[in-house]
Image (cartoon, rainbow, N blue to C red):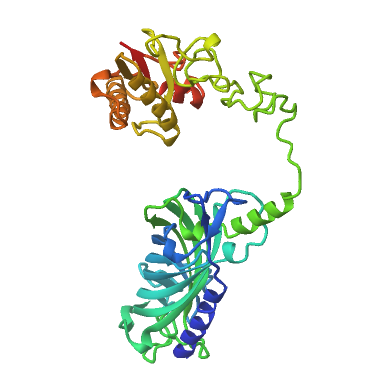
């Protein structure tokens, strides 16, 4: 009988793997947002990509209740319910987003019969029993929320229904007590063929955060022994249910899971419909016109009239986020018409400086446009055209220049001062490597003392494009 139960358990658990589906991951290098379901730019998941956490540790405690046995925990002869205690700990491995394995250790004590064995027997006919057990089992874990999910309701993806089934080995000691006292009636050692058992059940998980899950679980444990409850033994007088071949019990627990790994998302929490609904959205909207600007875009600069600050931008001019035509060197001539984009000059000379001996930059004249990412002194690829123009201009002039670094108002004054110096030296090094004489350049850091937008103090008062403009390097003639 015990062997057949084990075979049945395996038959229930193993086919689930054939229904488990590969998950998906965000293709732009970021991890999926596991707190919400719905469309995402996704690509097929493979175990080799290792873009999800797939290990976790679980632990919990609860109450076991013997339901099937000669002695039970619920509604005994005197109407009294007897509650035991249980605890478990497991190591969990997710194979796919819908199937995983658990190596679990259980320990507990069931209490059954007419009275608690800690109490005195009320009469000569009353019998109480308790069973201390230890068990190790391998469980299959099916995530029904992912396996059977067919409708993407765009709701928070924090709940998941899991099913468990598996087999293992159980060791226990059963004690019986009557009016004459207490004695141990059965003892089963672990890791023997006769100590095999199975358990199956379901759990409802709630995702607290990316690291911790809370789970309520109800398992049904089939012990495979008629002596587990402290009755049915050949030396015991308690054998009220002669047809009984296995004492079984329910185990209700509440536990937590700690997800391990460096990634944002755990594989069992990934929404398998992201890829499906992304493709459906693309197909559904492929031939539909999308109304982006309600009031239109009069100058066709890509910025809607609702927030365009310059509604008559010339055709072909590059604009900033507010729709204003770019003027890199701030000389009053927009880049579209400026013949010297990075060097200031008068309007009548198409934005280029006028001199008989070569271009000259007046003192206090500044060359803007070299911006940096937050907390970085790395020169961006978008800055190289500006810097290359600066190389040509400085080499053609007889003057020398200060290379001035600046920051936004985040972080401390001391930190920003050092960051601005690194930015200035980074630009200076680029110019020298590009052929500028080092004697013509002097790197200076001004920290957050020279803001292009002084109103951005603190930085939270301004949009990001203004803070980015404050993170810059510019040139100033000595």
Residue 184: image location, x then y, percent: 31, 80
Q: Residue 80, how many percent across, how many down?
A: 50, 67
Q: Horizontally, is 439 left or right of 53 in the view?
A: left
Q: Nearer the viewer, residue 207 or 448?
A: 448
| Residue appearing at x 73%, y 52% in the figure | 284
Q: Is residue 449 visible?
A: no
Q: Quadrant of residue 356?
A: top left
- Residue 471 location (% of width, % of height): 40, 24
Taking 65 as reference, is 58 above or below it?
above
Point 67% across, 58% down: residue: 151
Most foreground residue, 265 or 208: 265
**Picture residue at 36% right of the left edge, 7% below the top:** 363
Quarter in which the C terminus is drawn: top left
Residue farthest left in this picture? 439
Q: Is residue 282 visible?
A: yes
| Residue 143 vs residue 33, the one in the foreground | 33
Q: Residue furthest front?
A: 356
Residue 307 locus on image (x, y percent): 65, 23
Q: Residue 423 lies in what quarter of the image?
A: top left
- Residue at horizontal 48 percent and vertical 58 percent from the top: 215
**429 lies left or right of 336:** left
Please count the marks in the image: 0
Question: Is 189 or 347 nearer to us in this picture?
Answer: 347
Q: Work out whether 133 lies above or below 439.
A: below
């Amino acid at each position: 009988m015990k062997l057949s139960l084990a075979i049945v358990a395996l038959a229930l658990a193993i086919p689930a793997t054939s229904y488990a589906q590969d998950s998906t991951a965000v293709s732009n290098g970021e991890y999926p947002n596991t707190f919400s379901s719905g469309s995402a730019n996704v690509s097929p998941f493979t175990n080799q990509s290792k873009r999800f956490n797939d290990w976790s540790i679980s632990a919990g405690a609860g109450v076991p209740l013997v339901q099937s046995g000669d002695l039970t925990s619920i509604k005994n002869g005197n109407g009294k319910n007897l509650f035991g205690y249980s605890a478990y700990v497991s190591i969990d491995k997710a194979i796919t987003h819908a199937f995983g394995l658990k190596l679990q250790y259980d320990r507990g004590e069931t209490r059954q019969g007419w009275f608690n064995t800690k109490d005195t027997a009320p009469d000569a006919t009353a019998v109480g029993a308790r069973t201390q057990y230890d068990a190790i089992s391998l469980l299959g874990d099916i995530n029904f929320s992912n396996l059977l999910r067919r409708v993407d309701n765009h709701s928070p993806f924090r709940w998941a229904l899991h099913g468990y089934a598996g087999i293992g080995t159980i060791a226990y000691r059963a004690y019986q007590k009557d009016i004459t006292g207490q004695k141990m009636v059965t003892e089963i050692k672990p890791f023997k063929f006769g100590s095999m058992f199975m358990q199956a059940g379901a759990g409802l998980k709630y995702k607290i955060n990316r690291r911790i899950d809370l789970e309520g679980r109800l398992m049904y444990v089939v012990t495979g022994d008629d002596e587990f409850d402290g009755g049915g033994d050949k030396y015991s007088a308690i054998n009220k249910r002669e047809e009984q071949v296995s004492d079984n019990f329910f185990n209700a627990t509440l536990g937590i899971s700690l997800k391990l790994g460096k990634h944002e998302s755990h594989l069992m929490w990934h929404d398998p419909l992201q890829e499906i609904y992304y493709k459906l959205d693309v197909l559904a909207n492929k031939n539909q016109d999308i109304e982006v600007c309600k009031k239109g875009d009069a100058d066709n600069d890509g910025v809607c009239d609702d927030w365009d600050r310059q509604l008559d931008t010339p055709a072909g001019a590059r604009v900033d986020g507010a729709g204003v035509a770019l003027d890199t060197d701030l000389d009053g001539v927009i880049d579209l018409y400026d013949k010297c984009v990075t060097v200031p000059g008068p309007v009548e000379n198409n934005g280029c400086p006028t001199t008989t001996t070569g271009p000259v930059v007046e003192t206090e004249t500044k060359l803007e446009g070299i911006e940096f990412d937050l907390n970085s002194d790395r020169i961006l690829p978008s800055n190289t055209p500006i810097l290359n123009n600066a190389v040509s201009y400085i080499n053609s002039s007889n003057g020398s220049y200060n290379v001035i670094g600046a920051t936004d108002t985040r972080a401390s004054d001391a930190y920003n001062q050092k960051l601005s110096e690194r930015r200035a030296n980074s630009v200076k090094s680029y110019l020298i490597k590009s052929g500028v004489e080092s004697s013509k350049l002097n790197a200076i850091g001004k920290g957050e003392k020279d803001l292009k937008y002084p109103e951005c103090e603190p930085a939270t008062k301004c949009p990001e494009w203004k803070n980015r403009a404050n993170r810059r390097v510019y040139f100033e003639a000595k």
